[in-house]
Image (spheres, rainbow, N blue to C red):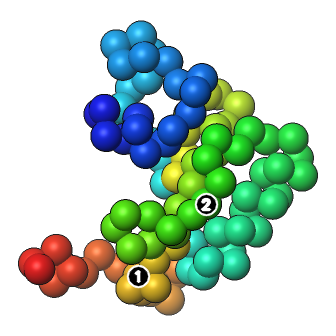
Amino acid sequence: MAELAKDINDINLPAIGTGFGGITLAFNAKTKEEADAIFAKVESLGGRIVKRPEMAFWGGYSGYIQDLDGYYWEIAYWDGWRFDANDMLIIDEQLFDE
């Protein structure tokens, strides 16, 4: 949980044990541009950008927003992700075998 809180990097994040549940919700974008567009839309509507997207330690591109209920959302993109015909992320176990 401490590593996730560190990754979010929000100075307003409650201390562990005082409200931060140690989870985030996630949106997996199909392109880096789609991720950027989501951040632009959130910002244009007055939403809270917690951490602007940047290259992540795991090789992807991600950042965080906070919704009106206080939940953190990671908006992320990785060029290795594949999506099916219904736009669902395909979880390929081989990616985790390395």
Query: Which quadrant of the figure has residue 3?
Result: top left
Q: Is residue 68 left or right of residue 58?
A: right
Question: Is 37 or 83 nearer to us in this picture?
Answer: 37
Look at the image and tell me in which quarter the N terminus lies. Answer: top left
The residue tagged 1 is: 81
The residue lying at 16 percent from left, 83 percent from top is 94
Number of marks in the rendered image? 2
Q: Can residue 28 be seen in the rendering of this structure? A: no
- Residue 45 image position (x, y, % from top left): 88, 47
The quadrant of the image that shows the C terminus is bottom left
Residue drawn at the location 43% of the way across and 23% of the way down: 20
Q: Residue 14, how many percent across, how many down?
A: 49, 18
Does residue 11 appear left or right of residue 88 in this picture?
Answer: right
Of mark 1 and mark 2, the one earlier in the sequence is 2
State the residue position of label 2.
53
Residue type, numbered disc 2: Pro
Residue furthest to the top in view is 18
Vertical placement of 29 versus 50: above or below? below
Q: Nearer the viewer, residue 51 or 84?
A: 51
**Amino acid type shown at disc 1:** Trp
Task: Find the distance from the CA under tag 1 to the CA under tag 2.
Answer: 17 Å
Question: Looking at the picture, does residue 90 appear above or below residue 56?
Answer: below
Label 1, residues with CA under 10 Å away: few <14, some 14-19, many ≥20? some
